[in-house]
Image (cartoon, rainbow, N blue to C red):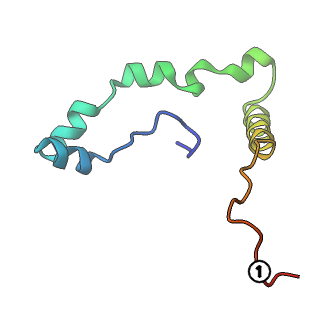
Amino acid sequence: MSAHEPTRRPLSASALAARLGTSTRTARRVWAQPRAQYEAQSLARQRPWEAQGISRATWYRRKHRAESLAQASAPTVPNRSGPQQGIA
């Protein structure tokens, strides 16, 4: 799973176990997603590239390129520290 995926868990199993006062094994078992549900939501199972009539590799390349362009065109926050001294 890439860093761009929104389905990442915010806590690790060990952090959850510590917070709940249980073992990591119990935390993983409680937090686990059933395999059928995981596969139903996976892109490989949905195959959106076939709907567009392109190869899987091309679909991922275009997706990556679109994400890169969206990130590059995002507005940037100006530096509010004021003018820097000593820079000519």
Q: Is residue 84 above or below residue 58?
A: below
* Point 18% across, 45% down: residue: 19
* Point 83% across, 81% down: residue: 87
Q: Is residue 84 above or below residue 40?
A: below
Would you identify the image quadrant in which residue 59 lies? Answer: top right
For badge 1, the amino acid type reads Gln
- Name the outermost residue toward the bottom: 86
Q: Percent x, y for residue 30?
A: 21, 31
Residue 75 in view: yes
Near-viewer residue (71 or 45): 71
- Name the outermost residue toward the right: 88
Residue 1 left/right relative to 22: right
Quarter the C terminus occupies: bottom right
Q: Percent x, y for residue 67?
A: 73, 39
* Point 52% across, 34% down: residue: 6
Near-viewer residue (84 or 11): 84
Residue 38 left/right relative to 19: right
Residue 24 in view: no
Q: Secondary structure at mark 1?
A: loop
* Point 50% across, 21% down: residue: 41
- Label 1: few (<14), some (14–19) or many (≥20) C-alpha neighbours in 10 Å: few
Q: Percent x, y for residue 36?
A: 39, 19
Q: Which residue is mark 1?
A: 85
